[in-house]
Image (spheres, rainbow, N blue to C red):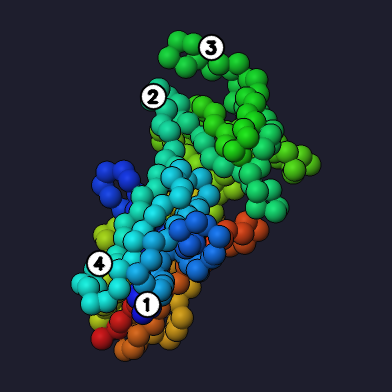
Amino acid sequence: MSSYESVNLFVQDRGVPVAPLEAVVVRVFSEDGRIVYGQSTTDANGLAGFLLPAPATYQVRLYRFATAIKNPNYIEVLEAPVSPATNDFTLEAEPFYHPQATDPRLCLASGFFRTPSGSKGRNVDMHFIAKFDPVLLDGSAVLTERVLARSDANGYAELSLIRFAQYDVTVEGIENFYRSVCVPDQPWVNLPDLLFPRVKVVEFSPVVTAATITLDVGDEVTYDIRVGATDRNWLPDITSDVMWSVEDPSVASITLTATSLSIQAVAVGSTVLKAVRKDLSIVTIPDTAIEGVPVTITVL
């Protein structure tokens, strides 16, 4: 007589070092692929769990956008009594990694496009129009001409751009608007993030450990702040696209400059330093919060 057994499927990056892969869709079928036994999505540990009849052999199929995966996979689920780890299986996938420019003067922008239906965005045309005057780059003349890019059958596009350069960009689908971009001083950048950047991270110097600042009443502390965006650039002004606040200004107050933040301890208690994006026009799924905040302020 068969029984139902707990089955753990772990999906990991086949690269080095090995890392779990999140948000991989896992579907379990009968060995011949005719019956669907369940579907799940891997968590942050790369785990998708199932309860399956045993003993039996199952066909497993994986899917994640922009990820190379060998399908199908087969697992043999054994019936108890067996070691709990016996019905744990590890499957491998190869996520996309951005290629890097070999020329230290260039940044290779690459990434994927999708249609409103979620399918691959094929043949998306982009025009990058240089905003700089003709320059000499390592002795070579760079003329103010546009750079063209088009996504392929997989919705993938890549092009080399000059680091620090600024471009006005037209993208198929939003041709009536220019996107002004600034190329980061990096060997690579995700092309969609370059086109549609958002605030990603806030860094404090000196470093705030355990996201907590402790002060005595009357004390004041100043931090140098860097605000980084998803286009791999640092913002020149920490207030340009970030709104700073304290939850309870009766406990602590803040003063801002273009590059620093000062905290004044007002009264005994606890409050929270917050930072949120000003520009909410770009929607990201999943909608991740700014890294590095909030920070708890405790006044003694």
Residue type indicated by callout 1? Ser
Please state which of residues 292 and 46 is positioned toward the viewer in this rendering. Answer: 46
Q: Classify 279 as above or below 129.
A: below
Report the residue marked by disc 4: 86
Q: Nearer the viewer, residue 260 or 282?
A: 282
Picture quarter containing residue 246? bottom left
Can residue 290 be spotted in the picture?
Answer: no
Kindly identify the residue that appears in the image at 50 percent across and 52 percent down. Answer: 64
Comes first in the chain, label 1 or label 3: 1
- Work out whether 111 lies above or below 205: above
Give the Cα distance between marks 3 and 4.
64 Å
Q: Residues within 10 Å of mark 1 (few under 14, many from 20)?
A: few
Whole-percent x, y for residue 181 in the image? 58, 39
**Cα distance, mark 2 to mark 3?**
19 Å
Pick whichever, 71 or 258, lies toward us. Answer: 71
Q: Which mark is residue 141?
A: 3
Marks 1 and 4, the one that precedes in the sequence? 1
Discs 1/4, front: 1
Give the image location of residue 74, x and y in percent. 39, 55
Image position of 273 (left or right of 194): left
Give the structural element (helix, strand or loop) at label 2.
Answer: loop
Residue highlighted by disc 1: 2
In this rendering, the label closer to the viewer, 1 or 2: 1
User: Secondary structure beneath disc 3?
Assistant: strand
The residue carrying mark 2 is 102
Q: Quadrant of the C terminus?
A: bottom left
